[in-house]
Amino acid sequence: MELLDIYDEQGNFLGSEERAIVHRDALWHKTIHCWLYDKFGNVFFQIRKDSNTLYTTASGHLQKGESIPEGFEREIFEEIGINIDANDATLVAVVPFVMDKPLKDGSVFRDRAFANVYVDLYEGNYQDFKFDETEVDGLVLVNAEETLRLFINGSGSVMGKIIREGAVIEKEIYFQDFLVNAHETALSKYGDILKKIIELSQV
């Protein structure tokens, strides 16, 4: 049974509850969005197994009693198999996220999350990645500046590297490959993250 800490809309701690109940009853909780980038200003997007779209490097719920650095390190290790020191990560924003998604069984997945968005420099080898095969189909490495321009334009493509265990392949990555929910735009969802990576890469 997975337990999550829950909060009111102002972020005041209320206690803990089962994950299924959190999403059934639209209870506020915390998530961690982990983004890795390299010293050349390139950013790692995860290829989601369930949708074949590009999303955070790794992300997930903060568990009961778990700190943000602990959650950052755990999600990175679970999804892409590397150990990092989250104390080096830089906060981009804490973003309130609201979404009600009808499911096939007729129920509604009700998400109310404070998304803690962090970026961290990765200087290791691509060969070190070990992907969670149930969730992740590899990573895509794209240039942050080029991708930001792509999102501003709202169409087009950039060249990227697809990283899977034992292989790196250059490929054209299209605007529609990125995960964007119905109530979002790619620029609103990813723009601040890319801007922060561009800023940090130029220091």
Image (cartoon, helix red, strand yellow):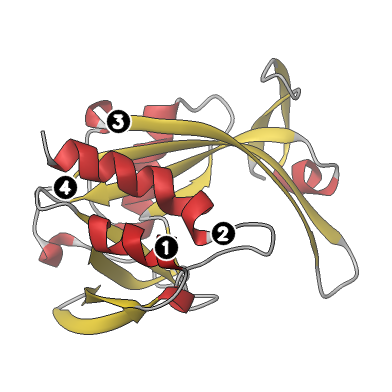
Residue 99 visible in this rendered orientation of the protein? yes
Cα separation, mark 2 vs mark 4, equals 27 Å
Tell me which label, 3 or 1, sits earlier in the chain. 3
Tell me which label, 4 or 3, sits earlier in the chain. 3
Kindly give the residue lying farthest to the right in the view shown.
106
**Type of residue at label 2?**
Thr
The residue at which mark 1 appears reads as: 151
Q: Is residue 166 left or right of residue 162?
A: left
At which x and y percent is residue 100? Answer: 79, 55
- The residue shown at (77%, 47%) is 23
Describe the element under mark 3 as helix, strand or loop.
Answer: strand
Tell me where residue 85 sits by quadrant: top left
- Of circles 2 and 3, which is in front? 2
Describe the element under mark 2 as helix, strand or loop.
Answer: loop
Tell me which label, 1 or 2, sits earlier in the chain. 1
Circles 3 and 1 in contact, beta carbons < 8 Å: no
Q: In what quadrant of the picture does the C terminus appear?
A: top left
Q: In what quadrant of the picture does the N terminus appear?
A: top right
- Of circles 2 and 4, which is in front? 2
Circles 4 and 3 in contact, beta carbons < 8 Å: no
**Type of residue at label 1?**
Phe
Q: Nearer the viewer, residue 10 or 203?
A: 203
The residue at which mark 3 appears reads as: 90
Cα separation, mark 4 vs mark 1, equals 24 Å
- The residue shown at (13%, 64%) is 126
Tell me which label, 2 or 3, sits earlier in the chain. 3
The residue at which mark 4 appears reads as: 122
Identify the disc placed on residue 185: 2
